[in-house]
Amino acid sequence: MITEQGVKDFLKTGGYIADDAIATAVFLALRMEKPILIEGPPGVGKTGLAKALSSALDFPLVRLQCYEGIDEGKALYDWEYGKQLLYTQLLRTQLDNYLSVSADLREAVERLSAEESLFFSRNFLVQRPILRSFLSEKRSLLLIDEIDRSDDEFEALLLECLSDFQVSIPELGVIEAKRKPLTILTSNGTRMISDALRRRCLYLYIGYPDLEREVAIVRIKFPEICDTLARQMVEFLRKARELNLRKPPSVSETLDWAQVLSILKESQLTPEVVANTVGVIAKHQTDLQKVNDLAVQELS
Amino acid sequence: MERIIAGFVAALRESGIRVSPGESLDAVQALGLCGMTGRRSSRQLLRLTLVKNVNDIPVFNEVFNRYFSRYKFFDPEMNVPELMDAALIDMEGEFNYLNQRQDDDHDEQGPLLKLDSDINPEDLQDLKSLTEIDPDDSDGNEIVVQMKGYRGKAKAPRPTRRYTQNPLTIELNKSNSAPMGITFTHEEQIAMQDVVSRMMMRLRKDMKRMKNNQNRGKLHVIKTIQKNYRHDMVPFQVALRRKRREKPRLVVLCDVSFSVSHASRFMLLLLHTLHNQMLDVRSFIFNREVAEITEMLANMPVNDLMETIDKGDIVDLDANSSFGQVFLAFKKRYLENLRGRPAFIILGDARNNYDEANDWVLDEIREKARYMLWLTPEERDTWKRGDCLMDIYGSYCDRVEVVKTVEDLSLVVEDLLRDIYADHAHPIDKKRLREAKAAEVYDSKDYYTRGSSGGGEAVFEPSGRSHW
């Protein structure tokens, strides 16, 4: 049986440092077979968690990126009209022969409708991400990314999939998931997500990590960065987050910065180093100035 | 354990967090799966399963601490020293509890409930007695009584247009006579977000339908062919060209002079919350001079902005307000740049300090505007008194409204937004909207009736407000 500590450990092998809340959520999601809804500021590793999980658990990752106007044809399934048309064309002679034995039109229609299911069978079904993950032989990880970008209608569509892990196709009936996928939904909170969807999920809020965890994250991703530099970086960025910037630096910025510093082979943060690499952590012109000022104030 | 969870869920609902029965079942299941290994992990489990919104997390933490802080052992087999220990822990707990109330926003070590070591999952039955709320405690009693009323559910959005139990109104009424600070309390901001989000919910549904209908236009040939590829090009489904949709624009001129600071601060808060929602809003503030604050509203926390305004950094607050001069300056500097026939909202008391009225500017603004709405905090019968030019200015406006509370304000703004959208709406929708509007029953509290016969004025209490 997997324990919460176990979850933490195997996430670490996937290169992801989890805190207690994350580990508990993953553990519960695995045991209760419920989706997790993750909210939090951009760049704190919401999608990263899903990727790390998929590699650590060896679940194939099925990713569905949401956008405005996404519908069931893009998310669940679609019929392959081209193939259907092509088949009817190719089979025309067979059809003629098949129907020619019938005595009158009524019988011909009956014969034809008896074979109707041929053209609405799984042969002609295009599996889109959700259905694909449901039908996967191996338990998969379904990542529904940035759900807040989609419309209300799409959210409603997800309700059936997420609570019962099944897809209703009018022509084929209800298709149930072979193995219930571990489902992760992420949201940046640009739009309120309906309570109905929230109710079906475990809710996990990932904020900025605490000092130790962020240092650990830098160290696991970039082992060549020494502990003191990592600590210095993280402390600096934590102060920068309190500066009220337009785009506060997130964990992903921390990692970018760590990469830049390791390429430049810096071993110490100075105002000059910050000034040279500030573009990695601040993404607006007004922010640049603020971060530089902070560097002069804190590091000199 | 089920009873504890049920009780805890009831306490959460009482505090306004909506928890469904399904979620409480989840919580029970989760606790069963993970076992009760410690206070922290139990809290995490409960939070994961019961709380579905970031904003609810602090409330959850508070309820958790309150609910799992008192306990009594009723074990007859317990010997005296243990009992003493329990009592000691209990007392300690109360102290801890008192000390921690100030800063227990996050988990870490909570007050007590020593689930950690001395109780294993088999003893869960005992937990029932641990969490029973002491009947002698007046606090507890109150909670029990209130739970029956299910106040949590009362917070759910209701179909009525008026929210009679709005916390902000109560707050406003309370603070009316007292001197007011300029910055907003956390509660005020939350309440405002609440009002606005409910308003948005109601609006959004209508907007969506209208938006869909607006797409009706000429046939889009390529899209129609693509769409009907599946039907062997027989056009069963028709795709129509999307009509160019004009984005509704709003221009707000807000008086920030001392005499209307009550109303303007809430107007600014409303604007701040409205910003980026679905409108193109340009906001200006004025006293004797006028300045645009659109950028600041979008980028600054509202309290910082209020402070900046209050310090007089944006417009000089010491001067006497002059509407005439403001209109003139506005015309010179901004009027030419306003595109797309915006709707105008002007908030002010129209007290011109005997300056030149310059009301002809309003006429020019009127030409540019789709709609002009004046919001004043003053009663109708004072509109002609003293230096008040409301009657003159009002004659240029489509509507003049008396707003006294945030609700008035949000109702008026919602109505305006509806009107703006209705202007863009498809003819079918327009007809439907007109019918809906005609069918609406106005009661005496409705702001529409405000000036018609003087009957509406009975609703407003005279204390403090009419003498701004």
Image (cartoon, rainbow, N blue to C red):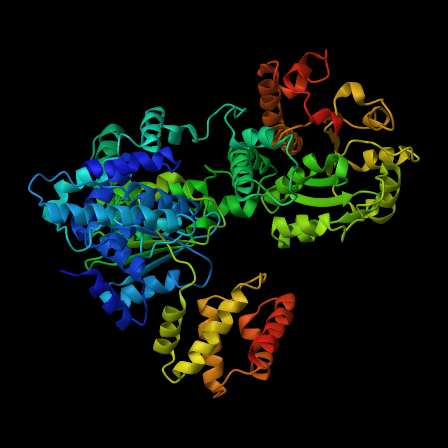
Q: Residue at x 54, y 74 (%)?
A: A280
User: Left or right: A119 with respect to B178?
Assistant: left
Residue B463 point in image, percent of width and height = 68, 23
Q: Is residue B129 left or right of residue A288?
A: left
Residue B451, image quadrant: top right
Q: Quadrant of the N terminus of chain A?
A: bottom left
Q: Can I make out residue A135 in this image?
A: yes
Q: How many marks?
A: 0
- Residue B457 lies, with reference to residue B251, above or below; the image says above
Residue sitting at x 72%, y 48% = B310
Task: Between residue A104 and residue B10, name the one nearer to us.
Answer: B10
- Residue A257 image point, x, y percent: 49, 76
In the rendered structure, the answer to whether residue A94 lies left or right of residue A204 reads: left
Task: Judge by depth and name the residue closer to the eye, B307 or B322.
Answer: B307
Above or below, A134 relative to B136:
below
User: Foreground: B433 or B270?
Assistant: B270
Q: Residue at x 51, y 38 (%)?
A: B238
- The relative height of residue B89 versus residue B368 in the rendered view (above or below) is below
Q: Quadrant of the C terminus of chain A?
A: bottom right
